Image: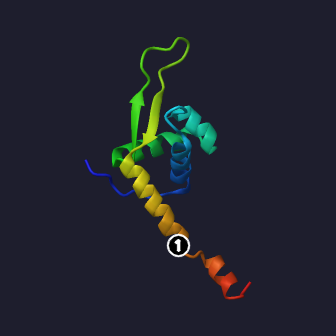
């Protein structure tokens, strides 16, 4: 399945930023993503579902059965997701914001 384009809302960008900062030695799971992104689970889990369906991220269940808590689902950016997010960020930075354009013109 090829990666689909998705709408990069503020919540989606925050989740992707957390995943981008997470490494193999510091995996990201749902609750941790909520904490680091400063978003509620009702926002984060639908974003994770959309990103996974679009092929931007992959999710894998924790091995074994930890005592005292449910298994975690670890999320990571796919290579394609990393590339698409990087491209989207570059395009966004290249686009001037209306306020920035006014400042460049000397209008305030």
Q: Determine whether 103 is above or below 66 in the image.
A: below
Residue beneath the point at 44% across and 62% down: 87
Q: Quadrant of residue 96?
A: bottom right
Residue bearing the label numbered 1: 94
Secondary structure of the residue carrying tag 1 is helix
Q: Residue furthest top?
A: 67
Residue beneath the point at 45% across and 42% down: 48
How packed mark 1 is, by other alpha carbons closer than 10 Å (few <14, some 14-19, many 20 or more), is: few
Image spot of residue 51 (x, y percent)? 41, 47
Please give the count of numbered marks on the rendered protein.
Answer: 1
Q: Determine whether 81 is above or below 101 in the image.
A: above
Image spot of residue 32 (x, y percent)? 58, 34
Looking at the figure, which quarter contains the C terminus? bottom right
Left or right? Give the position of 7 relative to 96. Answer: left
Residue beneath the point at 32% across and 52% down: 3
**Residue 49 vs residue 103, the one in the foreground:** 103
Left or right? Give the position of 9 relative to 5. Answer: right
Q: Determine whether 62 is above or below 7 in the image.
A: above
Image spot of residue 26 (x, y percent)? 55, 33
Image spot of residue 98 (x, y percent)? 61, 78
Residue beneath the point at 36% across and 51% down: 80
Q: Residue furthest left?
A: 1
Q: How is the image coloured?
A: rainbow
């Amino acid at each position: 399945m090829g990666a689909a384009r998705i709408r990069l809302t503020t919540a989606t960008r925050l989740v992707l930023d957390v995943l981008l900062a997470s490494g193999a030695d510091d995996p990201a799971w749902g609750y941790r993503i909520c904490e680091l992104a400063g978003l509620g689970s009702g926002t984060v889990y639908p974003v994770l579902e959309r990103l996974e369906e679009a092929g931007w991220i992959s999710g894998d269940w924790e091995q074994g059965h930890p005592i005292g808590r449910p298994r975690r689902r670890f999320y990571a950016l796919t290579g394609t997701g990393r590339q698409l997010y990087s491209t989207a960020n570059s395009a966004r930075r290249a686009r001037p914001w209306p306020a920035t354009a006014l400042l460049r013109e000397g209008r305030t």
